[in-house]
Structure formats: structure tokens, C-alpha cells
Image (cartoon, helix red, strand yellow):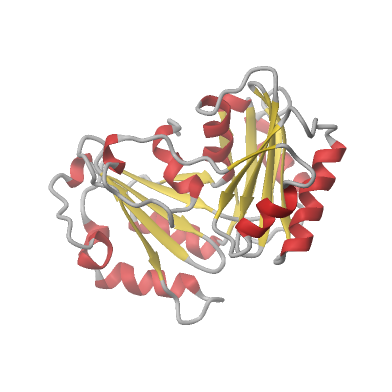
Amino acid sequence: MDWIMKDQTINHPDRSILTIYTGPEKFSFSLYDPKERGSYSYTDLAANNPNDAFSAFKEAFFEKPLFSLPFRKVLILNRTSNFIFVPHSFYKEQHREKFLHFLLSDQQGMALTCSVSSAKLTVLYQMPENVYQFILRSFDKPEFIHYSAPLITYFLEKVKSSNVRRMVVNLQEKGVDIFCFSEKTFLLGNYFPCQNLSETVYFILYTWKQLQLNQTNDYLHIIGNAVFKEELIHRLTSYLQHIYCPSILPEIYFEGVNTDKVPFELAALPSCGL
């Protein structure tokens, strides 16, 4: 199991939490013991074929004893751009199938829901059925979470700024997530496919204008590790005054651990109570 834990030893798997981050191009993993300092570990699972990352995951699953340990909890953080938010005031569980059929009419996999109580909304999203069924068979009571849930929860509960609105930009490999907040209210969340600086600048400034955010008072938070991140910040300073690159608030299991390459939503998940 040294392929994921490096030089660490899993002393208490019954106290540890394994999170599998699934996506169309790659899978990654995090593992930590909430009570142990510096126990957090993160690893990308490289796939020879970026269009078939699931095969690489299955190969690792059957080869490595790590996945058979009796963990306290197994979380499945699913990244998919096919999602939509429904306020709790509209969403009714007894009408779940009707919501899914109407809002996700282009069925591309297993339809799932994820509640985000801090924002009073439900995320409806899709996950490849073969991935879903494999995980369901392979782990004891895995919990499925959409990747937007920890981002929304974190910036509503952990990053508090009174009397200002905030836009959070999450830079991804093939697109950008934009989430907007007004104090403790979630205003908007969307994913825009784009792969270069100019398109990213356009989507950020277009959304900023549409929501009538204030360029001198409101805040822009930029997370993610796109290669053009620094250039993006430089370009946006011509338009916006308050631009920040927040980091995860420290927890004991992060002590002494470099989390620079950990996706923000994955690192934020342990502190979100999801």
C-alpha cells in the first residue's frame, strides 16, 4: 500500500476516512485519520489511457490491499459537469424520478442526488453506471457526494465576509467552475467548458457583470491549479480590485503536509460535515 501512503503507516484504519475522487479523465485518492497529526495523504492514479481512467482504478483496486481495509468511512467524490441545483423548497424526494427525468433528460449514466444543507439545495447529477455499480459492490456503504457540495459548504461556512458578495472560481483541466455568494446565501453555481486563458477571463467577467457584482467592493477567490493561474490573476487585476487565492484552513491531519496539489474541493471535504 506504499503506492498511496508513501512512508506512512495506517495505524487505525477503523478511524480513517478514504475518499475516492472520480472523474472522466482520472481518479485520485485521499486518506487520513481525523485524530492523527499529519496523517493526510493524497495520490493521483495515473492512467495510460486518459479516456479510460476507470480501468486503471479497477486494476489498482484488485492489486492493492489498501482498499480492503475496514475504514471508518468511504466517500466517493464525483466530478461531473452534468449537474443542476434545485432549492430544497422545490425539491421533493417522492418526486425524485420526475425531477431527474425532466432536468437531466440526456441520460448518460446513473442519476444521483446530493443534499447541501448549508445552501438549502439539492444537487442532481449523473455518474457512469459501471463506476457506480463497481463501487457499490466493492465497498461497505460508500457515501456519494457531488464535487460542488464541499466547495459551496466551505465558502458559505468557513469563508465569511460581511456586506460583500463573493465569486469563487475553481480552475479545472478542461473548464472552470463559478460559484457566487452573498454573505450566507448561495447565488449561483455553474460549470463552463474552456481550456485557455481568454475563454476563462470571458466567463468570469461575463458572470460578474450578469450578477452586477461590484468591482471595487466584492471579492473574487481563485482556486485550482491551471497552468495560466498567475497570468489570469494578472489579467483580472485590470478589472477587479479584491482578488485572493485562499488556502484550506489548517486541521491537525494536514500538519506538515503539502496540500498544494490536492484539489480544493477534496481538501475541503473533511471540514464540511458532509
**Residue sitting at the far bottom:** 48
Residue placed at 17% from the left, 61% from the top?
Answer: 7
Residue 56 placement (x, y as % from top left): 41, 74
Q: Is residue 148 above or below residue 214?
A: below
Q: Is residue 16 above or below residue 7?
A: above
Q: State which quadrant residue 65 falls in.
A: bottom left
Foreground pick, 191 / 223: 223
Residue placed at 50% from the left, 46% from the top?
Answer: 265
How many callouts does the rendering have?
Answer: 0
Foreground pick, 197 / 26: 197
Image quarter hosting the N terminus: bottom left
Residue placed at 49% from the left, 67% from the top?
Answer: 26
- Give left or right: position of 259 versus 202: left
Q: State which quadrant residue 102 falls in.
A: top right
- Give left or right: position of 191 versus 66: right
Q: State which quadrant residue 17 falls in.
A: top left
Q: Is residue 65 visible?
A: yes
Image quarter hosting the C terminus: top left
Q: Is residue 74 above or below residue 232?
A: above
Residue 241 placement (x, y as % from top left): 72, 37
Residue 103 placement (x, y as % from top left): 76, 45
Residue 95 placement (x, y as % from top left): 69, 34
Foreground pick, 83 / 160: 160
Residue placed at 55% from the left, 61% from the top?
Answer: 129
